[in-house]
Amino acid sequence: MQSKASALKGLLVPLAMGAVTLLVAGFDGRSVVQAADPEMKVDVTITDKGYEVKGHTSPGALTAIVVHNKGTMTHGIASPLFKDGVVKKEGDGTEVKSPKGKGARAYHLEPGKSMTLYFKKASHTDPATGISETTQVPLWCDIHTHMRGEFLVVETKGEVGGG
Ligand SMILES: [Cu+2]
């Protein structure tokens, strides 16, 4: 009887994990494993003086924003990007919910802590010309709104044989 029970337990764990994988795959067509393996990376270092942003991404690429708080107080990161939803958050940050609608208003991070936010930005097409454009994603601290930075979502269609 005891071996039967443990065999059942062994079955239930992979079943539960399978359900999680299905949910995430349903969300954006990718698996959990791929979500942890970003194609592009943007580094954001926050000090008490401001933001330092390094890197860029391209439309449709799974991107990791790696945020470090090297300041002495809690800092935040806010962006219009978060309205569309973050695929996944890893690390120490806490989500500040949007008062209305879906998505996060911001993420807060304690001093000395780090977090990673995964997202994908869709291609932006100029409605007047129909041409896909490079766009700028603004980031700012929602606690100290003078602290700002940005990165580019670089459209490479037609330039390096992409698309
Ligand atoms: Cu701040």
Image (tube, rainbow, N blue to C red):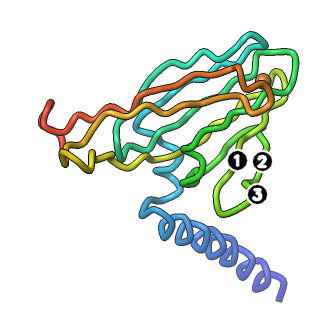
Using residue 64 as the reference point, say whether residue 8 is left or right of it: right
Using residue 38 as the reference point, say whether residue 102 is left or right of it: right
Q: Which residue is mark 1?
A: 105
Point out the tag, 3 or 1, that comes first from the N-terminus: 3
Q: Give coordinates of residue 92: x percent, y percent.
A: 78, 37
Q: Give coordinates of residue 152: x percent, y percent.
A: 41, 28
Point out the tag, 2 or 1, that comes first from the N-terminus: 2
Categorize mark 3 by other alpha carbons within 10 Å: few (<14), some (14-19), many (20+): few
Q: Which residue is mark 3?
A: 99
**Along the line of sight, the residue nearer the viewer: 145 or 3:** 145
Using residue 38 as the reference point, say whether residue 85 is left or right of it: right
List the single residue furthest toward the right: 73
Contact flag, marks 3 and 1 (Cβ < 8 Å):
yes
Contact flag, marks 2 and 3 (Cβ < 8 Å):
no
Report the amino acid beneath label 3: Pro
Please say if 132 is above or below 30.
above
Q: Which residue is mark 2?
A: 96
Ligand 1 located in image quadrant: top right
Residue 17, quarter of picture: bottom right
Q: Residue at x 38, y 43 (%)?
A: 61
Q: Give coordinates of residue 116: x percent, y percent.
A: 63, 37
Q: Residue 161 has which mark?
A: none
Element assignment for label 2: strand
Q: Residue at x 60, y 47 (%)?
A: 82
